[in-house]
Amino acid sequence: MDIGELLAKDGIVLRGGASSKRQALHVVAEAAAQALGVPEAQVLDALMEREALGSTGLGSGVAVPHARIPGLSQVVAVFVRLDTPVAYGSVDDRPVDLMLALFAPPRDGAAHLRALAAVSRAMRSPELREQLRQARTPDAVRALFVRDQQPATAA
């Protein structure tokens, strides 16, 4: 699954300001609402409902909040890089500054799970995380995710 293709055109925020997990999720919800054309409150409620089941903080400063949103026809991703990491309740207790959120149609569980697996695999790469932290433009972020999905070639 190509994460670069899942990223919403206007769904990359590189200077998100937040001082708490809830505020960070609000930044994600704001970006997603604009990219998806759905009410921000609906997105935030869905994200908070999912977080109530357990933290989506993967560790190493990364979180993958996700929710099902009625009206979507496919899985869509939104990327937020926070200016300052926030406490998130991650498995390693490290604060989060990289958030790759996924939004899926309510009845498309298989695609949602494939997207979660692809994002988890990609975000385990220390090199990718560092490059995402250094990226200066939304296009640079998108290019990193497209490049990360390319098969390795023999040298």
Image (cartoon, helix red, strand yellow):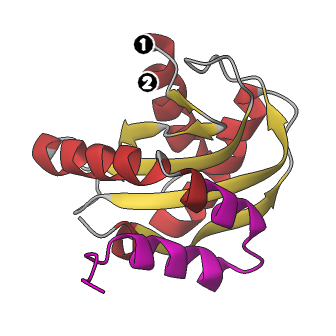
Q: Position of residue 47 (x, y in %)?
A: 50, 33
The relative height of residue 42 versus residue 132 in the rendered view (above or below) is above
* Residue 70 visible in the picture: no
> Label 2 neighbourhood size at 10 Å, few (<14), some (14-19), many (20+)?
some
**Residue drawn at x 29%, y 58% as measured from the top left:** 75
Q: Which residue is mark 2?
A: 50
Give the image location of residue 89, x and y in percent: 64, 16
Q: Which residue is mark 1?
A: 53
Answer whether residue 24 is visible to the viewer in this image.
yes
Disc 2 vs disc 1: Cβ atoms closer than 8 Å? yes
**Residue numbers of the magenta segment:** 129-155
Residue sitting at 15 percent across and 40 percent down?
109
Say which quadrant the N terminus sits in. bottom left
Residue 130 pos. (x, y %): 68, 58
Q: Give the x, y percent position of residue 21.
A: 72, 27
Task: Say few, some or many: other residues with alpha carbon within 10 Å of mark 1 (under 14 / 14 to 19 / 20 or more).
Answer: few
Callout 1: SS: helix
Check the picture and name the quadrant holding the C terminus: bottom left
Local SS, label 2: helix
Chief secondary structure of the magenta portion:
helix
Nearer to us in this view, 141 or 107: 141
Residue 144: in magenta span: yes
Looking at the picture, tell me which residue is in the foreground, 66 or 72: 66
Residue type, label 2:
Arg
* Residue 23 sits above or below residue 99 on the image: above
Q: Amino acid at mark 1?
A: Leu
Residue under the image location 81 percent in, 27 percent down: 20
Q: Residue at x 62, y 68 (%)?
A: 12
